Amino acid sequence: MRDPIDVYVWPLDVPPARRQSLAAHLSDCERARLSDATLSAVQEEVVIGRGIMREVVGLYLGCAPDAVALTRGPHGKPELADTTPALHFNLSHSGGMAALAVSREAPVGVDIEAARPVTDQLMRAAMTDEERCALEGLSAGAQQDGVFCRWVCKEAALKGVGNGLAGGWREMTVEAGAGPSLIASARIVAGSPHGDDHPPWRFAAMDLPAGFYGAVAAQSDAPLAVRQRMLTPNVTCDPSLLTR
């Protein structure tokens, strides 16, 4: 990829008036799906996350947030109903934080996860046998870093091709280094989100608050460059955002 991937990060905490304006951006279909969500906390994250996503995508397209025509891929990934002009984006939220990746060049995936204790059940659900062997014997902190850095890389790649959880974490093995470069050094050594590893999947880390892990994924011959912006969720996104 020649150009940086734009990444926007924001907390999912807004006053009632702002929440109401964000909800007004959503389509009838989005509102109908929200009514099926049983947890009010999930509804809040979706409303705020997708409302701000629509504001940002609308800036790239030069249209109002409620005029962004979206459709869903086979596994529910939001994408533009009209693919001209080309614009790829992906949204993730966890633990009260959201991240949005945007690219004009190629499909992108993003995942953000709030850290939690590493249990045997989590390891067996998300890590392959090879990954568990690499992580066994590490200190608690190093093991948490290793598990969640692999987790966000896998999910970001799966979301990049629109597979999400349906793609299968247990079919993909990620090898990573150590320390701050854990995500940037990660590479898929077995399995693939869609069977095509040319160009290879590459990953980039995000600058996140303590207690969060995040990765951006795309297929690229060169290392990924990321241009990150922290959003103030209480303020409507305006065109100056794209020139900062």
Image (spheres, rainbow, N blue to C red):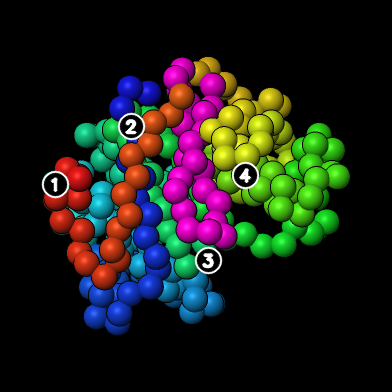
146 left or right, relative to 87? right
| Kind of residue sitting beneath label 3 | Gly
Q: Give the CA separation, mark 3 to mark 2.
A: 27 Å
Q: What residue is shown at x 26% (from left), y 40% (from top)?
A: 82
Secondary structure type for disc 3: loop
| Kind of residue sitting beneath label 2 | Pro
Q: Is residue 202 magenta?
A: yes
Secondary structure type for disc 1: loop
Q: Give the CA separation, mark 4 to mark 1.
A: 35 Å
| Corner quadrant of residue 242 | top left
Secondary structure type for disc 4: helix
Q: Which residue is mark 1?
A: 62
Q: Are marks 4 and 1 in contact (CB under 8 Å)?
A: no
Q: Of the residues under marks 3 and 2, which one precedes in the sequence?
A: 2
Q: What residue is shown at x 58% (from left), y 46% (from top)?
A: 152
Disc number for residue 4: 2
Range of magenta residues: 200-222
Estimate the x, y position of residue 53 in percent, counting from the top left: 32, 55
The relative height of residue 51 versus residue 147 in the rendered view (above or below) is below
The relative height of residue 5 versus residue 40 in the rendered view (above or below) is above
Q: Which residue is mark 4?
A: 149
